Amino acid sequence: MIHHASTHVRWDDLDAFGHINNAAYLTLMQEARADFTWYSRKLRGEKPIFADMVVARAEVDYLEPIHQGGIIVDVAITVSRMGTSSFDLHYVVTHDGVVRASGKTVQVAVSMETQRSRPLSDLERDFLTQYLEVLVEGK
């Protein structure tokens, strides 16, 4: 399964070159991730999860520039790996049917009491498993 989030590109996401600044793509992914784990779950009457996670790593591949603000892009999210206390999310950012960027983040679940990593709960694993897609290198 794939989670889709519609994310707004702000005017100030554009840089001096007239396209979305590289750092803004991480914000688009962050907004989509918040929708994935929080807002869309609340809309379905489900309890939000992963309020206690941190991003341990982020990477972005910039494929085709976007030259305008004030638009909506689609950010598709899948889970590409699950570990004991961490998981990887894969993102595909599209606009007008064109893939503009792809990315990956590594999230770590954290105990708010100890401020250290903690194992993923059964509820979290069940949720993530719905979106688990093993990515093939080069695809």
Image: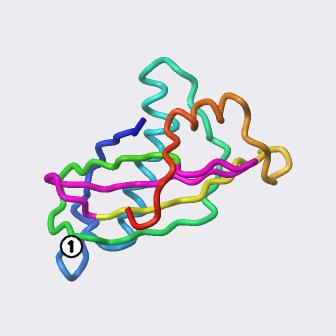
When asked about the image quadrant of residue 12, the answer is: bottom left
Quadrant location, the C terminus: bottom left
Quarter of the picture holding the N terminus: top left
Residue at the (78%, 43%) spot, across then down:
119
User: In the rendered structure, does residue 94 fall within the stretch colored magenta?
Assistant: yes
Residue 66, position in %: x, y?
Answer: 19, 66
Residue range highlighted in magenta? 80-100
Q: Say which quarter of the image contains residue 100.
A: bottom left
9 above or below 77? below
In the image, 138: left or right of 84? left
Relative depth, front residue between 40 and 123: 123
| Residue closest to the eye, 138 or 1 | 138
Q: Position of residue 26 (x, y in %)?
A: 42, 63
Q: Is residue 110 left or right of residue 139?
A: right
The residue pinned by badge 1 equals 19
At horizontal 27% and vertical 48% (from top left) the residue drawn is 74
- The rendered magenta stretch, by its main secondary structure, is classed as strand
The residue positioned 53% from the left and 51% from the top of the image is 80
Quick check: is 74 in the magenta stretch?
A: no
* Residue lying farthest to the right in this orientation: 114
Residue at 65%, 35% (x, y): give it: 125
Residue 50 x/y as whole percent: 62, 40
Give the class, few, some or many, for how many residues have Cα within 10 Å of label 1's Cα (few <14, many ≥20).
some
Residue 22 % position (x, y) = 35, 73
Badge 1 marks a residue whose secondary structure is: loop
Q: Nearer the viewer, residue 134 or 88?
A: 134
The amino acid pointed to by label 1 is His
